[in-house]
Amino acid sequence: MKALLVEKNRVEVVRKQLLESGYLDTRRKLVRRGDQLEVPIKDTALPGSYQFTVIDQDHMEFYESEPGLRELMSSYLDEERLKRLPCGWQIIGRVIIISIHSDLYFVKTQIGSTFLKMYPYCKSVYIDKGIRGDLRKPDRELIAKRDGVISPQETVHTENGCKFKLDVTRVMFSKGNLQERIRMSTLGSGEVVVDMFAGIGYFTIPMVVHSAPKKIIAIEINPESYYYLVENTRLNNGEDIVEPILGDCANNTPVCVADRVIMGYVKRTHYYLANAVLALKPSGVLHYHETVPVHLMPVRPIERIRSAAEEQGREIEVLCWRRVKKYSPGVWHVVVDVRVF
Ligand SMILES: C[S@@+](CC[C@H](N)C(=O)[O-])C[C@H]1O[C@@H](n2cnc3c(N)ncnc32)[C@H](O)[C@@H]1O
């Protein structure tokens, strides 16, 4: 059976990525091999982004199998309904987020308590009903919490050495953006960065923790997200680096100060391109996010950036682009990196 050889300090992130993409073999334990760990994977093909050696394990260690969701719910549901139980879910800190089929609403409380049995370190379970509006606010319903828990909605999610405190009913945390948060954590050392759509610090915090920029001007319009941006800056010891600003980046983005600008927002990002270009010093780098139909990828975002730059008499060099995640059928969330001269 196969495993990836991963350095100890990267195991936490790689394991989480494999779990979320369905490639982790959860029946087997991690096995130590010198300075590295063998992370068990399923025999299905891996996406190219995993840059680790694949080995055939000589020695495997298995977990004792625990009863799964279906088994634990079998006294409440018939065979047909058991098949509709969720196959995947998200764990943010100590909170479990699930989506359930409308046919299963009548047993939502039992589903919630079953999840709490399966994850003893978790404190609450919410049903996810989507994300609403320009402020990307989640719509979530509490279905179970442990006795005595006062704030079932607030938790601290740890990822890649970063702490993100958040209220799961007020702000989003996208598991699909994990790879991009990791990529941002490798950039910005010694630079002045403007994070125009900072949220709770999705990109600001990884940079603070791993790259130590000179300064990050982090702008956020939603007071609830701004509260956690400030809180997360403090939790990750970033007060000397981050200047949080509560407001609209259309009015608060500074001019000609940035070595790097992050536009981590989708759907209406292009409306703010003029501000981003104005913020960049000559040769600064822009990370521009957009939701793009497959047939316009990557031409539309690149042309939008080029046109915004040309309006200010500036030129661009496209450095790279990548898919962040699937957004809807035929539409991808894409990020384009360009240098603006
Ligand atoms: C949700 S984040 C994007 C998600 C993030 N990239 C991730 O990794 O999950 C986008 C943020 O931009 C904020 N926002 C939207 N319009 C804005 C504006 N005009 N100025 C500043 N912030 C804005 C939203 O409130 C939200 O917190």
Image: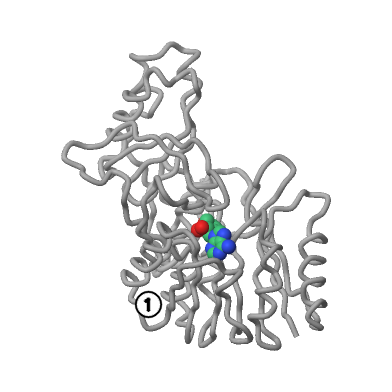
Residue 118 visible in rendering: yes
Where is residue 181 drawn, in percent x and y? Answer: 52, 64
| Relative height, residue 2 to residue 117 (above, below) | below
Most distant residue in the front direction: 251
Residue 296 location, x and y as percent? 82, 54
In the depicted structure, whether residue 166 falls above or below residue 66: below
Q: Quadrant of the C terminus?
A: bottom right
Callout count? 1
Q: Is residue 179 visible?
A: no
Classify 10 Å Cα crowding around label 1: few (below 14), some (14-19), many (20 and above).
many
Residue found at x 73% / y 81%:
340
Give the residue number, with chain letter if any, for mark 1: 238
Query: Which sits in the foreground, 323 or 205?
Result: 205
Instruction: Give the left or right position of residue 282, taking residue 5 as reference.
Output: right
The answer to which of 191 and 224 lies nearer the viewer is: 224
Q: Mark 1 near ligand 1 (CB under 8 Å)?
A: no
Amino acid type shown at disc 1: Gly
Residue appearing at x 65%, y 47% in the figure: 326
Residue found 40% across the figure and 66% down from its top: 229
Q: Residue at x 31, y 28 (%)?
A: 114
Picture coordinates of residue 237, whole percent (x, y): 33, 76
332 versus 336 height, above or below: above
Visual colour scheme: one colour
| Quadrant of the image where one finds ligand 1 | bottom right
Q: Secondary structure at mark 1?
A: loop
Tell me residue 227's x, y (percent): 37, 62
Name the residue at the left extreme.
Answer: 148
